Amino acid sequence: MARPRTPAAVPRAAPTPARRLLHGTIAALACLLYGYCGGVVAGAQLYVSRDFSLGTTARGAVVSVFLLGAAAGALGAGRVSDRYGRRPALLLSGLLFGAGLALAAFAPGLPLLLVGRVVQGLAAGIASAVVPVYLSEISTDRARGRMGTLNQFMVTVGLLVSYLVALAYASGGEWRWMFGAGLAGVAVFLLALPLLPESPVWRERGSGAARESPGPRAALRALTARGVRPALLVGTGLCLLQQLCGINAVLYFAPTIIRSTGLGASNAILYSVYIGALNVVMTMLAVELVDRWGRRPLMLLSVGLMFVALVPLGVSFMWDVPAHSLVALLCLLAYVAAFAIGLGPVVWLLLPEIFPPGQRALGAAVCTMVNWLANFVVNQFFLTLVGAIGQGETFWLFAGICLVGLGFVWHRLPETRGRDDATIASDLRTGAVR
């Protein structure tokens, strides 16, 4: 009697566009939490400083230790996600977000609050390195731009939610509830995570048990190889520009900046809500334009408009101009809008696009670490710099960096829309910016 034929393996059905969007949204919830943890300190620090009697250095540390934790998390994220998978790395990120927010909410003093902020930073670093890679790997070539910008869109939503929560608790100065409210978002993310499939690119490269992660020396050699070096240069340059332009100093210290114009703490937090809402709206516009106009035109427009907005912003703080508070707010809004339409979302889309598949996770992780370290430097010394040279002069310094960055984008960044890995690598290597 003949043996029954074993049925052939049924190939996995390709996910529908709606299901891809669902998976991308779930993954990007990690970036919403990263935006929340980064932004909530803007309002909370006004009251933490009062309760713990913090000076300028300590206030800066409450913001900046988060960024050091994020740099460490980003550096380790590449190896974790390559060995164990993108989904386990996102699970680790969610658990760390929960632990960090809980520690901050119940901190009896500054030391434990700083520990909580470091743990939040570790989670944010993992999320910021893994989510863009995951979104790139689950998307089709046609939808890669829209899917990739979902990462930054969720960051802006998290920032806006954090500003709204800070505004809700501002009247009582309840900064502990500002941190604690984020635990609701952590619960939603962890409950949705089982619906998330593993990245098909990671699956095709073999199981985590069989995978051997390269050692640090081998990884460094791979990233500095002749074919990968141009991508590393452009990626790190874009990440440095994204932070040294001063955007996160403005977003994290928005209430402090606006309060310096003469407004009270509650009004300052309210105006920061307007800034956060505009950030969301303009990022949504970027999602629509990135596959129509391309990455390079949006980057040039964004950095150029940021320079234009920063010059009068500096003037408004240096001289006694009419309607000082209104002029400063309008310039801040223009600056944030310019960032949100290009430099904010497009950098995170470009990182997985410019690296070859084999070095994608590690390359994105290294560039993300550089991003967080630059973020730390700017935020740790922002208030000190303002005190040393003045607020207006500080914004002019950021304007100068934008001008240099505009030249870098013009000369070094090729268009990646609709191009395959080989073409992008060739353009990076030859310096073609078509």
Image (spheres, helix red, strand yellow):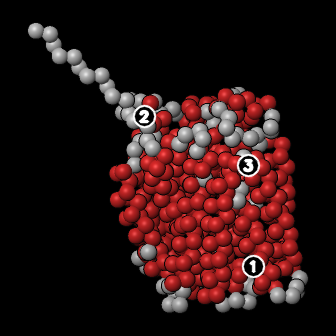
307 up-or-down from 172: above or below: above
Q: Amino acid at mark 1?
A: Leu
Disc 2 marks which residue?
Answer: 203
Percent coordinates x, y for residue 399 in the rendering: 83, 64
Q: Earlier in the sequence, mark 3 or mark 2?
A: 2
Measured in 3D between alpha carbons, the distance from the residue under mark 3 to the one under mark 2, in whole angstroms, is 33 Å
Which element is circle 1 on?
A: helix
Q: Which kind of residue does numbered mark 3 sit on?
A: Trp
Question: Who is closer to the viewer here, 195 or 368?
Answer: 195
Q: Is residue 368 visible?
A: no
From the image, which quarter does the N terminus lie in? top left
Say which of marks 3 and 2 sits in front: 3
Vertical arrangement, residue 398 with respect to residue 203, above or below: below
Q: Label 1 belongs to which residue?
A: 329
The quadrant in which residue 154 appears is bottom right
What is the secondary structure assignment of the residue under circle 3? helix
Residue for point 26% across, 22% down = 7
Would residue 356 be visible to someone looking at this image? yes
- Sequence-first tag of 2 and 1: 2
- Identify the secondary structure beneath mark 2: helix
**Residue sitting at x 67%, y 28%:** 422
Using a 10 Å C-alpha cutoff, classify the residue at mark 1 as few (fewer than 14 neighbours), some (14 to 19) or many (20 or more): many
Residue drawn where x is 43% and y is 67% of the image: 185
Snapshot quadrant of residue 47: bottom right
Three-letter code for the amino acid on which mark 2 is drawn: Arg
Q: Is residue 146 left or right of residue 236?
A: left
The residue at which mark 3 appears reads as 293
| Crowd band around label 3 with a 10 angstrom C-alpha radius: few (<14), some (14–19), many (20+) | few
The percent coordinates of residue 13 (x first, y second) are 39, 36
In contact (CB < 8 Å): disc 1 and disc 3: no
The one of 142 and 151 positioned closer to us in this rendering: 142
Residue 18's disc is: none
